[in-house]
Image: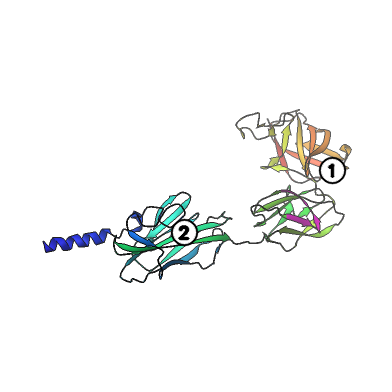
Amino acid sequence: MRFVLVLAVLTTAAFAYPSGSRIPAGNAGEPGTGTPCAGCHSVTLNPANGSVALELPSGLTYEAGATQTWTLRISDPNSSRRYGYQLAVTAGTLSSANGVKVDSNNGRVYMSQTASATSYTIQWMPPADASGPLEVYVAGLAASGTRSGSAYTAAYMLTATTQGPTLRPESPVVSLATGAAEISAGALVALYGENLKADGETPAVRINGLEAQLISATSKRIVVLAPADDTRGTVGVVVSTPRGETPAVEVTQVDSAAALMPRNGIVLARHLDGSLVTQPGELEDPWLGSPAKSGETVVVALTAVPADAELARIQVFVADLPCVVEALEEWSAGIQRLRIVLPELEAGDLAVRVMLDEKALPKELVIPVR
């Protein structure tokens, strides 16, 4: 009988301390989940003289996509008790040599212990695209089996670091149409870098001290319309945000940076019904896009053509055959549309050449004709 009693005591002790994988999500002290660990233990919540805390090397900040190593410490006046924890964070990835991922639930990721300890090391990697505040909840338990125990809780709000915008070192400011570091008034200009835009803000771009019209912006690329400016030669370009501004980078401003607008290696053009001129089978439905046809009238997109340009100054050739130029007009900010009539052509991807004042515009593009 004595042997049976000892065995029963040992068995009870073994099952009184589950590994983290057996602890259900919802025991990290997060809002709306009740007293942590009360489902299996008789506990007092946050008694005096004990605590649970996270040591956060970056304080209450984080950098998106950058791993942090946290130290979780549990303190309790009764050193004979066994210890465990559950931690929840609203985003990211958790890992630990002495912890186990429990579950993802209600928009949170959870981790708990695998063995009793008063301190644990946890690695957390926030999402690469995280930008808002993230919540961390942790509960530490000090208990003697399922009998008397103490549960301690703590909560943290982590805020993304505010990194200022930077422009990349190679070709940071170029013509959107050609990719060359030459721009002019009325040209669409692309700026490439990091942290160029954050949520809820509108970046500003100055070219030679003049504000450029913003067309579109992401964290890695901004497109603007270059302002009217008589300066020629090297000018400075600056990106400004509420988080700071970039040092000025240099680009060359010329008389005219007029160019054909590209689209996936072909010229950006539309049929008169508004559908795109595309490669055969590029789009599922012909009403969305199809190749041009011999003798068809199409609209070709250009950028930075001078506002006073007359049709007599423009010539268009497809496969070295002249097209009839019918009209030139504004299409959208920084883009002009040139309506042309294609000559009789052989089928194929045919070179398009636009001449302004007898000078060929960049860049080398083709139009699919079938």
Q: Is residue 210 magenta?
A: yes
Residue type pointed to by label 1: Leu
The quarter holding residue 293 reads top right
Indicate the position of residue 27 as horizontal and vertical percent values.
40, 56
Of 184 and 125, which appears nearest the observer? 125
Direction from residue 334 to residue 222 in the image, left or right: left
For residue 137, which numbered disc appears in the image? Answer: 2
What span is in magenta?
204-215
Q: Does dot 2 land on a helix, a strand or a loop?
A: strand
Q: Is residue 200 magenta?
A: no
Q: Is residue 209 visible?
A: yes
Mark toward the start of the polypeptide (1 vs 2) = 2
Residue at 31% x, 63% y is 148
* Crowd band around label 1 with a 10 angstrom C-alpha radius: few (<14), some (14–19), many (20+): some
* Crowd band around label 2 with a 10 angstrom C-alpha radius: few (<14), some (14–19), many (20+): many
For residue 252, which numbered disc appears in the image? Answer: none
For residue 356, which numbered disc appears in the image? Answer: 1
How many angstroms separate mark 1 from mark 2 (CA)?
65 Å
Indicate the position of residue 286 as horizontal and vertical percent values.
64, 29
Q: Nearer the viewer, mark 1 or mark 2?
A: 2
Indicate the position of residue 188 as horizontal and vertical percent values.
76, 48
Q: How is the image coloured?
A: rainbow
Is 163 drawn above or below residue 180 in the view shown?
Answer: below
